[in-house]
Amino acid sequence: MDPRPGGGAVKVTGAVREQLPVAGPASVRPPPGDGAGGGARAPGAAGEAVGAPAERSSRPRRPATEDPAWIRRGLTALALGFLALFVGLPVAAVLSEAFSKGAALYLAALREPEALAAIRLTLLTAGIAVPLNAAFGLAAAWSVTRFRYRGKDLLLSLIDLPFGVSPVIAGMVIVLLFGARGLLGPWLVAHGCRIVFAIPGVVLATVFVTFPFVARELIPFLEAQGTEEEEAALTLGASGWQIFTRVTLPNVRWSLLYGLVLCNARAMGEFGAVSVVSGHVRGLTDTIPLHVEILYDEYDFAAAFAVASLLLLLAVLTLAAKQLLEWRAGGRGAPHGSRS
Amino acid sequence: MSATRRGVLPGFGLSTGLTVFWLGLVVLLPLSTLGLQTARLGPAQLWQVIASPRAVASYRLSLGASLGAAAINAVFGFLVAWVLVRYRFPGKALVDALVDLPFALPTAVSGIALTAVYSPHGWVGRFLEPLGIRVAFTPLGVLVALTFTGLPFVIRSVEPVLADLEPDVEEAAALLGATRRQVFRRVLFPAVLPATLTGFSLAFARALGEYGSVVFISGNMPFRTEVAPLLVMTRLEQFDYAGATALASVMLGASLLLLFAVNRLQRWTRARAGAP
Amino acid sequence: MSAPRSPEPEGGRWPGPRELLLFTALVALGAVAGGLPHQRAATPGGTVELLNASYDPTRELYSEVNAAFARDWKQRTGQEVVIRQSHGGSGKQARAVVDGLEADVVTLALGWDVDAIARAGLLPASWQQRLPQRSAPYTSTIVFLVRKGNPKKIHDWPDLVRPDVAVVTPSPKSSGGARWNYLAAWGQAARRGGEAAAREYVRRLYRNVPVLDSGARGATTTFARRGIGDVLLAWENEALLAVEKLGPDRLEVVVPPVSILAEPPVALVDAVVDARGTRPVAQAYLEFLYSEEGQRIAARNHFRPRSEAAARLQPLPALERFTVDEAFGGWRNAQATHFADGGTFDQIYAPGGGRT
């Protein structure tokens, strides 16, 4: 894997590469019609064209960094087919049900006071859980990928553990710990602090369930990236905090963003764990997913799916924000931008 | 630097301390109650709970369907990530957004939506029914639900790594006369294998514990389509905390074991691939 | 990453960490700001709040009762009362109350669940004697919901075990309503032919069940919307509600000649009302259920009221109903014999029929 030079070294490699024949195959890569999809993401294409024509004639075979069109189309079709079957159809089912009684009823379902209360609670929960887990994720990824120590595999597995815990069990253990008959519950109640069947419990359950997301996105990335840049910065006299904010953070920003987006989506959509600890008090401790369940159980299917589609909308909005950042970054370091 | 050093970079104490503290507070402390509750059962009772034929049947279904779903996700997740990173096609941004939706939808909603699509009268189910394929209310339905819930894991693990691969290596290999297939096998595949494995293990672990979406589509028939988390729930409904935690501990042990194994395997593949 | 290829110097358009931090901070701030006003405002003088933890099929009933009681209470005392509702599976709700859900009153599906709360010491074991009619202001029974026109000609319990009939009922392990279904099936068979016949009957009945949902409403949806099965076993009030909401043109109710007398109990949670000082209003709330108005609301929601005047408003077909106490010697026995681990229900599904 390529050791990425940081800081000033960048320009040097860039310049060197332009003069080397290595850039050759790249020029053949993007067929004309291919670059249409996302102009923002084709930063390399123009620059790489330098010195290409001569190169092409010298190499009779198809460059090994590009797939033939039929493979490209075939794979794309296969991937899209898979997504359509497993994600597209269920999502379409939700939307068609949501609008089955017309747009007016759709909006009415969202304007109900109890729906609004559920939306507020969900936003609050995600707003607390996501930053907390982001901070943790950065610390954990730094620790796990930048140092060698015994028990690291175990630590990694423990970080993943909340994925392996059934959300229902996650809720249950929180009740067992903080409930009226739990380990800490009686003491907390005596001090006027209520956790389960109140908002803190909902937040806690969400933090538990979304715990590994950011760390899990960052670790493989930092692992693949190696430590050369940071070590270089260290030899140049940068402090730990400087290395972290100036070198590491800019490098991981896309992974971090993915982590945040996923963590946020899951935090807002969590059902099982929250269902156990919330107590289902309408208008007080109901989150969007719980409100969906209530409506569904009242045979109000259109309203249930309308509120559920709101979660889709929130997810799409977060993704749009992500896309916007990618677009603003102009493809520099954007995950999809480097290749076509 | 000497081999015994942890590493040259600063922040070991801070980052590891923070990690362990937060992990302990949010995850391990609550999970410790599982052990405490389970300890209330005597060994004989414990064995009776966790080794009853019905429980064993549910482990088999949960493990099998989770493995299957994770495998499907590993293959197709890699494919989707590849297509999203390497190719351009109209509507790519939309497809990209679609990938995260399984996380955003509450599991119960996914379950209901999947049942609506795959039940005998559903959009897809009605075409499968004449072919003799039943999805909803069979183990196949469990597989579909688990594939759905774990879908984003592999894609989102592989995507950044794939996007971050420097073209130089591929180009160099090509210059040295490697065919496309060789480049893929020798260069690309080893580079993204760790991320794929991560995604696989996460999808598996998540599937093992999945409850909300499965109950709607599985039919919950004992010995046939009853998953282990449902058994836990059932015991909970009967105020049997000890029995519930005993079963939960078994599942937790299984997923911990698998996560641990994959983390080891990953380290091994990385060492073999000669990564930094 | 393509950063190195860019002709631009490092640190150009996207400062990275700062924007990321900003992104996170904005999301967090927006969310917290949006969420805060949601915190319950301190109850202004004169307003009292009650929480009623109930089971699933009573949503419509209690939203009507709550409004009527608030009006009544305001008239009598001048005090505003807000009643919050929490609904869920009966057993789950009981567990939540035991674990600290501060419900002033519980209105559950079966006495067994209130007993569980009593065992935790939150209300006295004699709770059932504190209100008239064994603390059950309204009753119901278990009936059959079939497709319009009753194509499979299902009229009585023996029809359910015909090989050509598929029956939908939730799992009695996880659903309170399903336990009533099970006991109704067992009890009527035992009356016809004794214990052994009952065992054989329920065994054959559950052989005809293609899907065991975890809750009563889930089972109704499976039957009515997914088109699974020929007959749904359900509470009478649930069946009538399902016909009303899911299509009078597609479903109809069949009342068998014999079924069980379901008595969903209500109770005050002493520990909570004493701690919150809400005993008088909570007591009045439960008593309101027995009033003529409360009984009329129950009748309107397809329950069978105790008051005969209210029952005449919305007459339901007569049938013979046996009680849990008569047929099973009380809930404690029924629970131990039929639904506990290794009980008769587990035996149906045990391979070889005997072991757990």
Image (spheres, coloured by chain):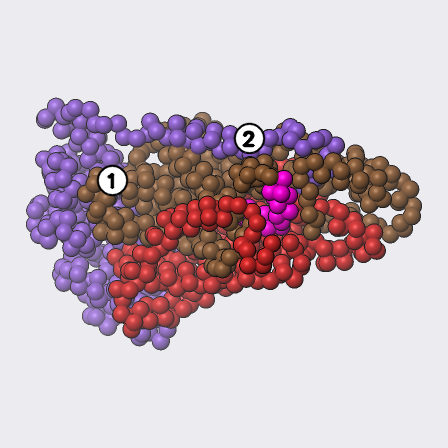
- Does mark 1 fall on the same chain as mark 2? no
The residue carrying pointer 1 sits among few (fewer than 14), some (14 to 19) or many (20 or more) residues within 10 Å by Cα, namely some
Residue at which label 1 appears: A193
Looking at the rendered structure, the kind of residue marked 1 is Cys
Which chain shows up in purple? C
Specify start and end residues of the magenta stretch as a single range: A216-236
Chain letter of disc 2 in the image = C
Secondary structure at badge 1 equals loop
Chain letter of disc 1 in the image = A
Residue, x 13% and y 48% (percent of image)? C123
In the image, A290 versus C140, the foreground residue is A290
In the image, B134 versus A325, the foreground residue is A325
Question: Against A317, is B232 above or below?
Answer: below
Question: Which x, y percent locates residue B266?
Answer: 58, 59
- Please say whether residue A228 is one of the residues in the magenta stretch: yes
Residue, x 64% and y 47% (percent of image)? A228
Secondary structure at badge 2 equals helix
The picture's colour for chain B is red
Question: Against C281, is C149 above or below?
Answer: below
The picture's colour for chain A is brown
Question: Which x, y percent locates residue C184?
Answer: 23, 59
Q: In the figure, residue A133 lies in which quadrant?
A: top left
Residue at which label 2 appears: C19
Question: Against B105, is C29 above or below?
Answer: above
Looking at the rendered structure, the kind of residue marked 2 is Glu
